[in-house]
Image (cartoon, helix red, strand yellow):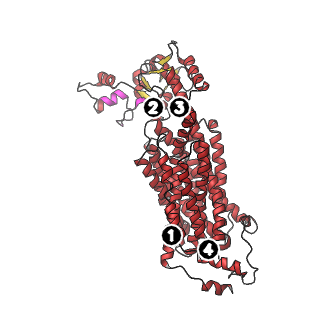
Amino acid sequence: MANNSQDNLPSLSQAGKYLIIVTAFFGWFFGGMHMAITSGAMRSAAKSLHIQAGGDTVTTDDNASAIAKLEKFDIDRDGHLSGAEVPLAFFDANFDLIISSNEIVLANFSPNKAGVLLDEMVLIEQFDGNGDGQLNQDENATAHKDSDSDDILNKDEFALAQLDTFANGELDAVEAGRARWRVRPDTNHDGIVSGQELVDQAIENRQNNFAKRWSGFYVVAFLFGAALGGLVFGRIGDRYGRVKGMAASIFCYSGMSAVAYFVQTPEQMWVVRFLVCMGVGGMWPNGVALMSEAWAGASRPMLAGVIGTSANVGIFLTFTVFKMKDVTVDDWRWVMLLGAVPVVLGLLVLSAVPESPRWLADKQARETGEPEPADEDEKPPAEITTWEVFQRPLLWVTLVGILLATVPLLGGWGSSNWANFWADEVGERINEPGLKADVGMARALTGLIGSFLGGMIASYVGRRLSYFIISLVALGSAQYLFWNLTPGESGFLLWFSVLGFFSGIYFGWLPLFLPELFVTRVRSTGAGVCFNFGRILTALTVAGTAIFLEAFNNDYARIGQITSFIYLLGAIGILLMPKGVGGEIKD
């Protein structure tokens, strides 16, 4: 009988159970490391590989762009932009030859632009009433029209106060020319933008646009690779054992990362990162299935939080490394070698981690033709197929499971992740390469807390109610972030942390709930299908966004505003899950 056969199988020792926890944690920890590499290093890699392939060569379009700007704004026809020509060329958004107060604010406070530099000596000469060479609080308030009395220097108010001769709230070309406008093409900061500097700007813009697109393409490689890896390695885990599936996944993402060190073109990098991410995708279903089967019972909510947290710990620590050692266009290949370190973990898993007794019992039942213990009168178990989860009675459960897994994936990779690339570009422009690390760390730190609590929140509040509430709060946080803030502002890190916390809860929720949807025989396959088919849908969305970036005016904020509405779909999707599904592990 199957029951006797199962009883004769060795049970896991306590040491074996803890070894499973540790290795599964680190397996997904290193998966998180590769997620951080995708967010924090691939834009630099894309731009570097593009330049290496000839992307720094001047093109006809580059010259045409510079000529067009000179023809339009070089009023005195001296071959460069200076004085009043500079603000009109770079900050007159509506091309009315007037710099409005709104345009001044944009110039001052958008890191995507540059700003106005006003001579501090002029301030002192005009408003230093006591002649001490500096402005005190009262003098500063007078100089800057500090109407809200917050004692904070407000450049746009000063620009209007000092340059707006007619006090009409606008600067005409002559008035604007009295300020020293800081613009990126003016690399030597002499207040003059030469024709060559305009050509250099066109090259830089082209390279940045290329990096933007390929940043998205590398995210697509991650998502498609992880989706296929979830299917392939999930199938290996169901057929040959959870341990073998997990070890194979780790070898895949560490070995191929070493290969990425040697790539020479953006296309080669895409292929290699696709293979890396197949391993990342395969780690999730095997690790979750192994832990769920080894630790069935009351401890599972906490363990779901542990495995959900592990990726965020990996993300946070990887961005911490990026903070200590900048990842730049000139220095990024070392990151690929960092991604190869987990090969040691793969050897440990293969040699020391015990196999799941539940999987061993199911394997014995299949080999002997005995029925599963729960149903003595049933026919011998059929051969496992991936598409079994798309057949009745599992079809609807699988489809809703895919939807519920897609929401946090698309919310993270298709919406929030653009903020990392946004911060990377802004940091490059304002010479703060560590800004992307700050943004990544802010999200990951609160995300690891949220993911650790996710399983427990789902257990105490309820699977459905917790998912519903999380979706609505994440939607509100993302909308506020992308509508009101910009990387480099202090509030950006705060609100990105808030979004990171609530979106992180999903990744403690999913490891608890998805395995509960399927019986042992198809658990790894079913969980992998849900999580990784979600990646396919996310990849298609990210690919479309990357291809049509120009339709968004290369505006990361607008992308985030639109794509974050996926969280609303999550609040609706959880209501579609059939009642009575989930809540315990089925044999």
The tag earlier along the polypeptide, 2 or 1, is: 1
Q: Given the image, on which type of amino acid does mark 4 rest?
A: Ile
Residue matched to label 1: 21
The tag earlier along the polypeptide, 3 or 2, is: 2
Q: Is residue 33 above or below residue 59?
A: below
- CA distance separating discs 3 and 4: 55 Å
- CA distance separating discs 3 and 2: 21 Å
Residue matched to label 4: 585
Q: Can see residue 302?
A: no
Range drawn in magenta: 139-156
Residue matched to label 3: 204
**Disc marking residue 108:** 2
Residue drawn 66% across and 65% down?
235
**Disc marking residue 557:** none
- CA distance separating discs 4 and 2: 57 Å
The reply to whether the C-beta atoms of the residues labelled 2 and 1 are less than 8 Å apart is no
Q: Is residue 415 above or below residue 446?
A: above
Badge 1, how many Cα within 10 Å: few under 14, some, many 20+? many
The tag earlier along the polypeptide, 4 or 1, is: 1
Q: Given the image, on which type of amino acid does mark 3 rest?
A: Glu
The tag earlier along the polypeptide, 4 or 2, is: 2
SS of the residue under disc 4: loop
In the rendered image, the quadrant that contains the N terminus is bottom right
- CA distance separating discs 4 and 1: 18 Å
